[in-house]
Amino acid sequence: MHDVHGVEEAERMGRARSRIFFVLAIVFFSGQAAYFGSSPLTRDSTPRIGAWLILVCLILMLLATGGFLLRGRKVRDLLNDETSRMNRLASQALGFWVTIITALALYVESMFDSLTFNEGVHILVTLGVGSALISFAVRERRAHSA
Amino acid sequence: MTERLANSIRNAREVYGWTQAELAARVGVSRKTINTIENGIFVPSTLTALKIAEALGRSVEELFSVIES
């Protein structure tokens, strides 16, 4: 049995998490829009690719764990209980399907247009990870306010 | 014809005058989980259903039922 204070703290953190994930998704998609909007000669600079890789790894870690790793075990267990685990699994499944369908679409597109390997990877990762992130945020938000 | 899980958790909870957070604390889940189960959005695991029934002093069959729509 948990105390009500712990449940309320997990509730606050859960709501904050869905907001943070929304903002993170906007930052992620904006970064990709800037990437494709910039000159092909400069878009693959080391700092830019490094920042992108760090952001992708951070988002993947958040999607895999639910975040708040430095918080106490009890609150984290509440935050990532049955509902959140199901929401996370459903979001990861959506991300998987979006990635596969995008990969197929890119394969067909490459027959008609030239696409670099880096551009293809960016598109795949952006849509796959981004869709999972948004899906999780939406599902969590809906669960909180249902 | 589809089947869905109906429940009377809200009524049973209100008998005790508990909020969703109070029931969640007794069951050991988040308020969100109680909320989504009460509203039929989320189907709980057997473990959670048993814990909710135990917290409310009811049997699982009293709290949950399958309805066809």
Image (cartoon, coloured by chain):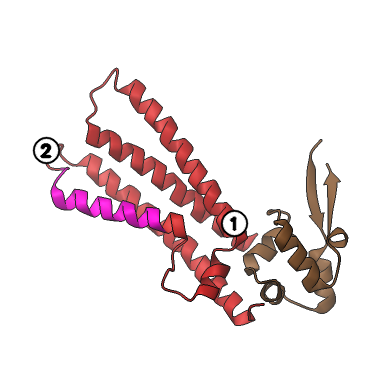
Chain colours: A red, B brown
C-alpha gap between disc 1 and disc 2:
43 Å
User: Which residue type does callout 1 highlight?
Assistant: Arg
Q: Quadrant of the N terminus of chain B?
A: top right
Mark 1 nearby-residue class (10 Å; few <14, some 14–19, many ≥20) = some
Residue A115 vertical placement versus B66 (above, below): above
A58 on left or right of B63: left
Measured as percent of width and height from the top left, residue A121 is found at: 29, 37
What label sits on residue A142 in the rendered view? Answer: 1
Q: Residue at x 22, y 30 (%)?
A: A116
Kind of residue at disc 2: Leu
Residue A44 belongs to the span the image colors magenta: yes
> What chain does mark 2 sit on?
A
Q: Which residues are magenta?
A: A43-61
Which quarter of the picture shows residue A24? bottom left
In percent of the image, x 16 and y 53: which residue is there? A47
Label 1 marks a residue whose chain is A
Magenta run includes residue B26: no
> Disc 2 designates what residue?
A41
For this orientation, the residue located farthest to the top is: A112
Q: Which of the 4 image quadrants contains residue B56?
A: bottom right
